[in-house]
Amino acid sequence: GKLRGQRRPEAFDFLRECCGGKLILACGVPLAASWGKADYCRIGPDVGLDWDMKSAKMIHLRERISTRNAIGNTIARRHFSGRYFANDPDVFILRKKKNSLSPHQKHTLYTINHIFGDLLFTSDNIGSYDAKTMRQYQSSFPALPKDIEKVEHDGEVYHIWFRIDGRKYFAAANLSRTDQKIALPAPTMYHHGEGFVEHPQAVYFKPFETRIYLEFPKGDLGIAGSDLHLFPGCEVQSLTTSADGIAVEMHPECKLSGTLVLKVSANSSQIMVNGKSHPVVKKLDDALVILDVAEGKLS
């Protein structure tokens, strides 16, 4: 004799009683009935093996399997995270076989999940990755919490502002099928595919392309760029200065080799980093030091 609106939360209460303190992931459930009941909850449809299920889209089936719709829900339902449950955006796909997603589409899915998702899954066998794909996968470690400041969109182009450990980031995602021109919000930003971009009034994005930019740091010491992490700077666990120079501690989960660029305060042509002298480069009207990293350790 109970309405379904009564039965659903009672069912969740029963599951909680059965599970005790174990974590519950709710998937494919009415969201409102899950608020405060599940630890994690899927907040969109299943990711597909292509961008959108054309046959289901043609008949306007809203609850179809759809990578495009999964990404849209991950962005739109970001506010649920930390309020009602932790958000599960579904899997990301980086593998080359058994899917027809383009490289840009896979990277966009991967990036949006890592910006907004609280639970990160992949359906891939990562042991089958080639070296380039494995590097992309490893570039997400360590996974650190993001403070989402603002999201704006113009049609299918999304602008995302967020912080990680005080560093300012900007991401732009072009979910459309056409090239798009985007103006970056800060005078100087870093993207490891482009390097330092100064006064960028027009950056061109290909269809389905997403990029992450790190804002140039203020102050006497900061991370200006790197190619070691999906979010440049997250590979550094601590960065301090003293009379002996600069101390850099790399995060133990960083295993990649590449380059780390620091903004420093230096009047000389050399500066000590971890007890070793490094040349100072004058660029962007600032002093930079470029450090080599080998398998997560400073050379």
Image (cartoon, grey):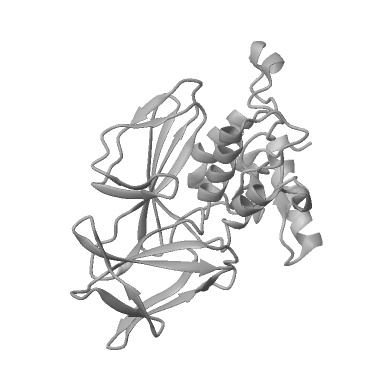
Place of residue 105 in the rendered image (x, y in percent of width and height, measured from the top left): 58, 33
Query: With respect to residue 236, does 183 lie above or below?
Result: above
Residue 36 visible in the snapshot: no
Toward the bottom, the furthest residue is 243
Query: With respect to residue 276, does 57 lie above or below?
Result: above
Place of residue 251 in the rendered image (x, y in percent of width and height, measured from the top left): 53, 72
Place of residue 53 in the rendered image (x, y in percent of width and height, measured from the top left): 68, 21
Task: Identify the image quadrant of the N terminus.
Answer: top right
Q: Nearer the viewer, residue 14 or 236?
A: 236
272 to the left or right of 232: left
Toward the right, the furthest residue is 18
Place of residue 179 in the rendered image (x, y in percent of width and height, measured from the top left): 43, 23
Q: Nearer the viewer, residue 190 or 149?
A: 190
- Residue at the (47%, 55%) spot, across then down: 231
14 to the left or right of 151: right
Q: What is the total number of numbered labels drawn onto the structure image?
A: 0
- Residue at the (48%, 38%) spot, across then down: 210
14 to the left or right of 170: right
144 to the left or right of 29: left
Q: Nearer the viewer, residue 273 or 40?
A: 273
Residue 93 visible in the snapshot: yes
Query: With respect to residue 106, does 268 lie above or below?
Result: below
Q: Quadrant of residue 89?
A: top right
Query: With respect to residue 199, does 242 lie above or below?
Result: below
- Residue at the (58%, 63%) spot, across then down: 256
